[in-house]
Image (spheres, grey):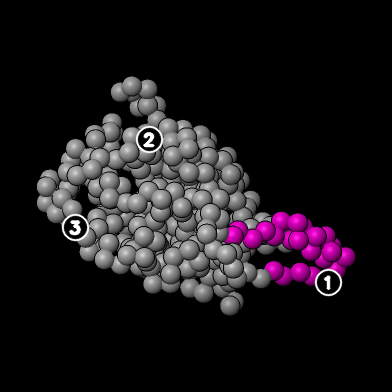
């Protein structure tokens, strides 16, 4: 089996561990709101393509909902929770919430950057499905699991794949997303056409981990974009976008976003954990959970990133953010 290109090795280590409508009143302030909308409303178009006659629209950047008097209480709740989190061992908290049907969003430190860790498995899946659009047989291809392509990483969870047993690409994608299996991830990265993976980042205008992989970080707003293009089916076809999101609903991790919503609510999400350490001594962790909560009629993307002294403190805060957000959405649309 061919080994990974050396300049991509450090990106692998990181893998371990987006229609809208606006309400405007008719009072004198409407013109100010309209001006704010026009100033901040920006299309996100696919970059890096060879198309001559089209320029695909992936999503829109829109003004924060509080500028139009919406979700103000939710924003205040985030700020209040941020204060209390610091007293409970969570040194940093960042949140990005967006109603996927209306485009209304609010955030807290939404552009602060964190180590994404296993969150990068989402664009890896997207890249593989993009490659499969051109070569559908790719997903049926099989390859043996070679433990030597998945080097041990401190604090990383061991793979449950059976050495030298053959797995299909689709089964490896399943294990990479559902169980966050790092052996499956490394095996896929040893098989993937790296132009497709690079293409995902280029298309969205997100920095490629290969450019500065050892220090690579992403913000909640950026990470949410991967889920927005899946929901809108603006990068992959509708069929592959559906397949990706269905797989994300089967993620086994339930102590973050899932813990904050009522039982039975569907959540398509992925978590990532990065251990902050000096040598063998753990200094803390960065824990993130990002995905789509399928609230009836108003599914929303929610991305929460944290830095904390321990996992339990981070999980507690993420679940609280999820619960606060779900209740705010329910209050906003309870009469709909």
Q: Quadrant of residue 135?
A: bottom left
Q: Label 3: which residue?
A: 142
Which-is-in-front pick, marks 1 and 2?
A: 2
Q: Is residue 293 above or below residue 276?
A: below
Residue drawn at 48 percent across, 63 percent down:
235
Q: CA distance from mark 3 to mark 1?
A: 62 Å
Q: Which mark is residue 7?
A: 2
Mark 1 nearby-residue class (10 Å; few <14, some 14–19, many ≥20): few
Q: Do labels 2 and 3 touch, CB within 8 Å?
A: no
Instruction: Tell me which numbered mark, 2 or 3, is placed earlier along the sequence.
Output: 2
Q: Quadrant of residue 10?
A: top left
Q: Which mark is residue 26?
A: 1
Q: Is residue 208 magenta?
A: no
Count the labels in the image: 3
Q: Nearer the viewer, residue 241 or 74?
A: 241
Q: Magenta residues?
A: 22-45
Q: Is residue 20 above or below residue 80?
A: below
Residue drawn at 17 percent across, 43 percent down:
146
Left or right of residue 106, residue 327 in this image: left
Q: Is residue 229 visible?
A: yes
């Amino acid at each position: 089996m061919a080994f990974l290109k050396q300049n991509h090795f450090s990106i692998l280590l990181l893998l371990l561990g987006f229609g809208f409508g606006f309400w405007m009143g008719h009072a004198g302030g409407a013109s100010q709101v309209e001006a704010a909308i026009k100033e901040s409303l920006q299309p996100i178009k696919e970059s890096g393509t060879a198309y001559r006659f089209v320029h695909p629209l992936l999503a829109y950047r829109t003004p924060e909902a509080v500028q139009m008097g919406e979700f103000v209480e939710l924003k205040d709740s985030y700020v209040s929770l941020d204060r209390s989190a610091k007293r409970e061992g969570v040194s940093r908290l960042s949140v990005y919430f967006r109603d996927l049907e209306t485009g209304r969003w609010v955030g807290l430190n939404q552009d602060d950057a964190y180590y994404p860790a296993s969150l990068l498995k989402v664009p890896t899946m997207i890249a593989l499905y993009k490659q499969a659009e051109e070569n559908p047989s790719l997903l049926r291809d099989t390859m043996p699991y070679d433990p030597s392509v998945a080097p041990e990483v401190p604090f990383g969870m061991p793979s449950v794949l059976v050495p030298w047993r053959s797995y299909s690409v689709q089964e490896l994608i399943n294990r990479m997303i559902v169980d966050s299996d790092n052996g499956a991830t490394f095996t896929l990265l040893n098989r993937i056409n790296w132009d497709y993976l690079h293409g995902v980042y280029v298309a969205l205008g997100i920095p490629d981990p290969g450019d500065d992989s050892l220090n690579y970080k992403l913000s909640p707003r950026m990470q949410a974009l991967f889920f927005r293009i899946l929901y809108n089916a603006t990068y992959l076809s509708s069929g592959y976008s559906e397949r990706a999101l269905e797989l994300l609903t089967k993620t086994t991790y339930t102590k973050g976003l899932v813990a904050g919503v009522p039982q039975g609510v569907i959540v398509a999400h992925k978590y990532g954990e990065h251990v902050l350490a000096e040598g063998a001594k753990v200094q803390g962790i960065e824990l993130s959970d990002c995905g789509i909560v399928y609230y009836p009629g108003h599914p929303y993307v929610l991305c929460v990133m944290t830095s904390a002294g321990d996992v339990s403190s981070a999980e507690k805060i993420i679940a609280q953010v999820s619960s606060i957000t779900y209740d705010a959405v329910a209050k906003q649309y309870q009469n709909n």
